[in-house]
C-alpha cells in the first residue's frame, strides 16, 4: 500500500508521526524510524483503529513506554501504536473498592505506585523502580524477587484481533518468567484491575518505597540509557555472575558496554547503535555458552529491522 494511503487511513484515529525515530522513544536511546507512530486518543478509538488495520491487512506493533526494547536501526515497518500516558484516554486510574484499583494501560508504574500509596494500599513493592507503563508491565509480567504483576492482577481488559473489547480474569498459573500467558487474541491491553491489600500504616509503605529506590540507585547504572536486565536468570544461576565471571565487566562493542556497575545491564555509553547492542548480546551469549555450556535467553525484546 502506498505511503499516502496508510496515512489517510490512520490519521482519523489520533496524532500520527511519520518516519518517527524510535530512538526518541526507547530507554536505550537507539532505534531507527517507525513508518507511522500513532498515539490513539482513547480505548474506543484504539479499538476502531485495530479493526481498520485488521480489515486492511496493515501490519502494526503495539508498544508502551519502550523501556524493554532494542529497536533495529532500520526501524519498524507499518504502524506503531504507542499506548502511554501521552494521551489522557489511557491515563486514568481509580479506586474500584477497598481492595481494587483500576489503571489504564498508559499509566506510568511510578504514578500507579504513588496513587496506591497515597490511598492506603500496599503490595506494590515489586513494581518500585521499574520504568514504563502498566500495559508493558502486564505483558512482561515485570517484577523483582519481591513479586510480579501476576501476583496482584485480577482482570485484564484488552482489544482482540478483530478490534473488539474483551477481558480475562487472571489466575496464578498465568504468570510466567517475564511473560503473562494471556489469550493469543489479546493484541492491545487497555487496562487492568489490581487486587491490593490495605496498608496498616501508609507512612511505612512510603518509607519502604524510598528504601527500594535508594537500593536500586546504588546497584543499577541509572546514569546511562539501558533497558534494564538483559538476560533472564537460568535455573539456580544469576546471569550477572555468569557474565561477570566470563571477565566481561566493561566489555564494549562500539557505544554498547557491559555495565561496570551491574553486569546483567548493557548500557549505551553514547552513540551506540542497536546493531552494536545486539552484537554485544550475542557475544556475551557465546562466551557464557563456551565457558559454562549455559544458554542465556534475553529478557529484553528485539523488534524491527536490523542492518
Ligand atoms: C533502568 C531499568 C530498570 C528495569 N528494571 C526492571 C525490573 O526490575 N524488573 C522488570 O521486570 N523489568 C525491568 N525493566 C524492564 C522494563 O522496564 C519492564 O519490562 C517494563 O514493564 C516494560 O514496560 P513498557 O511500558 O516500557 O513496555 P515496552 O517496552 O513498551 O513493551 C514491552 C512489551 O510489551 C508489549 N506492550 C507494551 N504495552 C502494550 C499494550 N498496551 N498492549 C499490548 N502489548 C503491549 C510490547 O509490544 C513489548 O512486547 C527495567 C528497565 C530499565 C530501563
Image (spheres, rainbow, N blue to C red):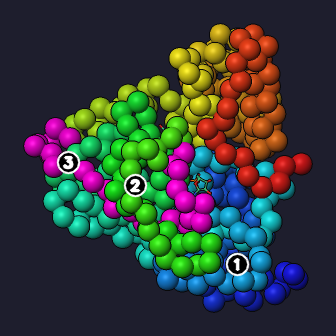
- Asked if residue 202 is among those painted magenta in the image, a careful observer would answer yes
Front position among marks 1 and 2: 2
In the rendered image, residue 72, in percent from the top left (x then y), is placed at: 79, 51
Where is residue 103, by image quadrant?
bottom left
Where is residue 48, by image quadrant?
bottom right
Identify the disc placed on residue 54. Answer: 1
Identify the disc placed on residue 197. Answer: 3
In the rendered image, residue 15, in percent from the top left (x then y), is placed at: 61, 80
- Asked if residue 98 is among those painted magenta in the image, a careful observer would answer no
Q: Which residue is mark 2?
A: 170
Front position among marks 2 and 3: 2
Verify CB contact (< 8 Å) between mark 3 and mark 1: no
Q: What is the span of residues highlighted in magenta in the rendered image?
A: 179-205
In the rendered image, residue 124, in percent from the top left (x then y), is placed at: 31, 44
* 86 vs 30: above or below: below
Crowd class of label 3 (few under 14; some 14 to 19; many from 20; radius 10 Å): some
Where is residue 290, by image quadrant?
top right
Report whether the residue tagged 2 is closer than 8 Å to ligand 1: no
Amino acid at each position: 500500500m502506498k505511503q499516502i494511503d496508510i496515512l489517510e487511513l490512520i490519521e482519523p484515529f489520533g496524532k500520527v508521526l511519520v518516519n518517527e525515530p524510535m530512538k526518541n522513544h526507547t530507554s536505550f536511546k537507539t532505534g531507527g524510524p517507525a513508518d507511522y507512530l500513532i498515539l490513539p486518543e482513547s480505548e474506543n478509538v484504539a479499538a476502531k483503529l485495530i479493526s481498520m488495520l485488521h480489515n486492511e491487512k496493515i501490519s502494526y506493533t503495539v508498544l508502551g513506554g519502550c523501556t524493554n526494547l532494542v529497536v533495529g536501526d532500520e526501524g519498524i515497518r507499518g504502524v506503531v501504536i504507542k499506548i502511554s500516558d501521552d494521551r489522557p484516554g489511557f491515563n486514568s486510574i481509580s479506586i474500584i473498592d477497598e481492595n481494587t484499583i483500576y489503571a489504564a494501560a498508559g499509566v506510568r508504574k511510578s504514578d500507579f505506585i504513588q496513587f496506591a500509596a497515597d490511598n492506603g494500599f500496599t503490595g506494590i513493592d515489586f513494581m518500585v523502580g521499574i520504568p514504563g507503563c502498566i500495559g508493558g508491565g502486564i505483558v512482561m509480567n515485570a517484577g523483582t524477587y519481591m513479586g510480579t504483576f501476576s501476583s496482584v492482577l485480577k482482570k485484564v481488559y484488552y482489544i482482540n484481533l478483530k478490534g473488539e473489547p474483551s477481558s480475562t480474569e487472571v489466575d496464578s498459573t498465568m504468570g510466567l518468567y517475564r511473560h503473562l500467558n494471556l489469550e493469543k487474541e489479546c493484541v492491545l491491553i487497555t487496562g487492568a484491575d489490581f487486587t491490593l491489600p490495605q496498608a496498616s500504616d501508609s507512612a511505612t509503605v512510603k518509607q519502604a518505597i524510598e528504601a527500594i529506590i535508594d537500593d536500586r540507585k546504588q546497584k543499577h547504572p541509572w546514569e546511562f540509557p539501558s533497558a534494564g536486565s538483559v538476560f533472564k536468570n537460568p535455573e539456580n544461576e544469576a546471569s550477572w555472575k555468569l557474565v561477570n565471571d566470563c571477565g566481561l565487566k566493561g566489555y564494549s562493542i562500539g557505544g554498547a558496554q557491559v555495565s561496570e556497575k551491574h553486569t546483567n545491564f548493557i548500557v549505551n555509553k553514547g552513540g551506540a547503535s542497536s546493531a552494536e547492542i545486539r552484537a554485544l548480546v550475542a557475544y556475551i551469549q557465546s562466551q557464557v555458552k563456551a565457558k559454562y555450556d549455559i544458554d542465556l535467553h534475553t529478557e529484553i525484546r528485539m523488534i524491527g529491522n536490523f542492518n
